[in-house]
Amino acid sequence: MPARIIALSNQKGGVGKTTTAINLATALAACGNRVLVIDFDPQGNTTTGFGIDKRGLQHSSYSLLMAESTLAEAVLTTQVPNLHLVASTIHLSGAEVELVPIMARENRLRDALVAAHDQYDYVFIDCPPSLGLLTINALVAATDIIIPLQCEFFAMEGISQLFKTFELVRKSLNPNLQVLGVLLTMYDKRNNLAQAVERDVREHLTDRVFETVIPRNVRLSEAPSHGAPGLIYDVKSPGSQAYIRLAAELMQRLALPAVPAVTQDAA
């Protein structure tokens, strides 16, 4: 079967996109799946989280996007068996401006990933915290989208805009794009506000929300400073165990009929 290309997107920063990309990919690779992670955020935190030194890299997600590298040239091995990475460098920060005059600029990443469909089971794209051309490229290339949502007061603020963008991409550029699920992150069960946010999100988005909730976890936060996924740094931590459960839930969801598309009204 062709690869499932999953974009992790939310225009709000600090919601757990990178942590999810790293650890969900690691959990799936540990199950024997062939996994590719594309760091599509100019900050390059996913690259750092896998212990990759960004300095001096000749090939990256920028060169892949600008057709200066093939996918085979851009792919790096990681410390995780079965898991490869396309790293991000600072050059990606200028890509949005450079793409403006290019014809069919929304399709650049999709075209670059044609070879990935036969080589991988899962491809994760860690999107930047914006709804610009980089994110549009990711959504056009993707088969599915996961929306990490932090359990805080402003959790639902801005999600309507993301769903609106999703619908525009579906209608005009990628009619096969599906919402795989909304993922609640940084959950603190001792916090009444977090519980209230979860109730509110599940009430509004129902079965579009993953059952698995990612807890706020110090070990997950520490792992990037050691250049390793949380599942390698401390597999027994509550955060790592949550991502293992999420991987199982994701595979189960993909075996079921697609979840109906989220509309702006549903948000």
Image: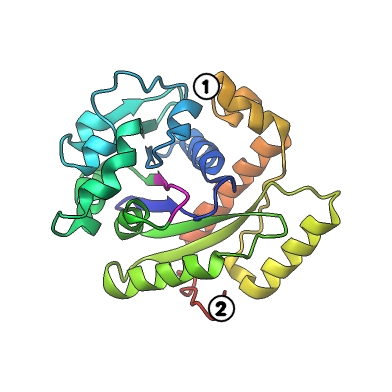
Q: Is residue 240 left or right of residue 103?
A: right
State which quadrant residue 183 falls in: bottom right
Is residue 186 among what the camera can see?
yes
Q: Which residues are magenta?
A: 124-130
Residue that lies at the very extreme toward the left in this rendered image:
103
Q: Say which element carries label 1.
A: loop
Q: Residue at x 57, y 60 (%)?
A: 182
In this rendering, the answer to whether 236 lies above or below 21 is above
- Percent x, y for residue 112? 21, 46
Say if the magenta span includes residue 125. yes
Q: Is residue 236 left or right of residue 140?
A: right
- Percent x, y for residue 191? 84, 51
Q: Say which element carries label 2.
A: loop
In this rendering, the answer to whether 127 lies above or below 182 is above
Where does label 1 land, which residue? 227
Q: Residue at x 32, y 75 (%)?
A: 171
- Percent x, y for residue 159? 55, 65
Upstream in sequence: badge 2 or badge 1: 1
Mark 2 and mark 1: Cα distance apart in space: 39 Å
Say if the magenta span includes residue 175. no
Where does label 2 land, which residue? 266
